[in-house]
Image (cartoon, grey):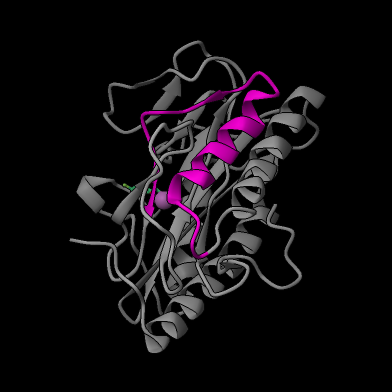
Amino acid sequence: MAVTIKSKREIELMRESCRILAEVHAQLGEAIKPGISTWDINALGDKLIRSYGCVPNFLNYNGYPASICVSVNDEVVHGIPSRERVLKEGDIVSLDAGLIYKGYHSDAARTHPVGRISSKAERLIAVTRQSFFEGMKYALAGNHLYDISNAIDAFCTRYGYGVVRDLVGHGIGTHLHEEPQIPNFRQWRKGIRLRPGMTLAIEPMINMGGYRVRWLEDEWTVVTQDGSLSAHYENTVLITEGKPEILTLLPEDSGT
Ligand code: MF3
Ligand code: CO
């Protein structure tokens, strides 16, 4: 399937799907406190998504067994919620969530501190988030896709962080994963030309140590190979004639 350009009507549906997801994330963020289990976070997220009449798109996706991916500390992405995994002060937790509204998918991730965290961990979260916005400076019609990748990589590399290579962002629309794939690390090619009406999920996954990752026995949870902390930040974005529209941010939302 080729890269799709969304019609005006499709863009309206994407906007609504993403706005609802932004609301869900805001409410999930408020629930993050020491003592909550990753299971409870998933249950809350699932309930919130359904309360808007939407369907969680991660549930049963290639057999993934939950609605929200909850990844703690050295877990990069796709952590599986568990009653035994209880958050404690000083942890960082990445929440990746998505939903379907009238056939249109949205996808976004945030990394939250649990109580008070180290200043090093705070910086990792802030730099990961900022790297997305560095990429956004290049998310302009007429530019090339990998201008975004290169901007994210350059920013994170400056801090000595590892930019995950084994997982990438993606186009999104009537499917969770559409073309193109969107790497977050330096590319030597240019990639496709960006055009108004493309909707893209851009999602830097950034490690405090090296870029290498491995998969746990559960075949889902991705962890850093060196055990270092990892952060994730993702929004669904619309390419326009002007600046990109970040669909999964609320107007008053700083996206944290
Ligand atoms: N944001 C992730 C992605 O874009 C979420 C998918 S994980 C799965 O790939 F649970 F749905 F598989
Ligand atoms: Co995604």
Res 249 → quadrant: bottom right
From this view, report whether residue 220 is shown above or below residue 107. Answer: above
The residue positioned farthest toward the top in the image shown: 226
The residue positioned farthest toward the bottom in the image shown: 9
Q: Is residue 100 left or right of residue 52?
A: left
Res 5 seen here = yes
Residue 195: % across, % down: 43, 67
- Is 158 a magenta residue? yes
Q: Is residue 27 left or right of residue 46?
A: right
Residue 74: % across, % down: 53, 23
From this view, report whether residue 211 is shown above or below residue 38. Answer: above
Q: Is residue 136 left or right of residue 188?
A: right
Residue 149: % across, % down: 50, 41
Q: Is residue 55 left or right of residue 22?
A: left
Q: Which residue is found at the position 77% from the left and 29% from the top?
A: 117
Q: Quadrant of the N terminus?
A: bottom left
Residue 21: % across, % down: 52, 67
Disc tally is 0
From this view, report whether residue 71 is shown above or below residue 44. Answer: above
Q: Nearer the viewer, residue 170 or 74?
A: 170
Res 97 seen here = no
Res 217 → quadrant: top left
Q: Nearer the viewer, residue 229 or 38?
A: 229
Q: Nearer the viewer, residue 75 or 51?
A: 75
- Is 180 a magenta residue? no
Q: What range is drawn magenta here? A: 141-170
Q: Nearer the viewer, residue 42 or 111?
A: 111
Q: Which residue is found at the position 55% from the left and 57% from the top?
A: 139
Q: Which residue is found at the position 47% from the left and 66% from the top?
A: 47
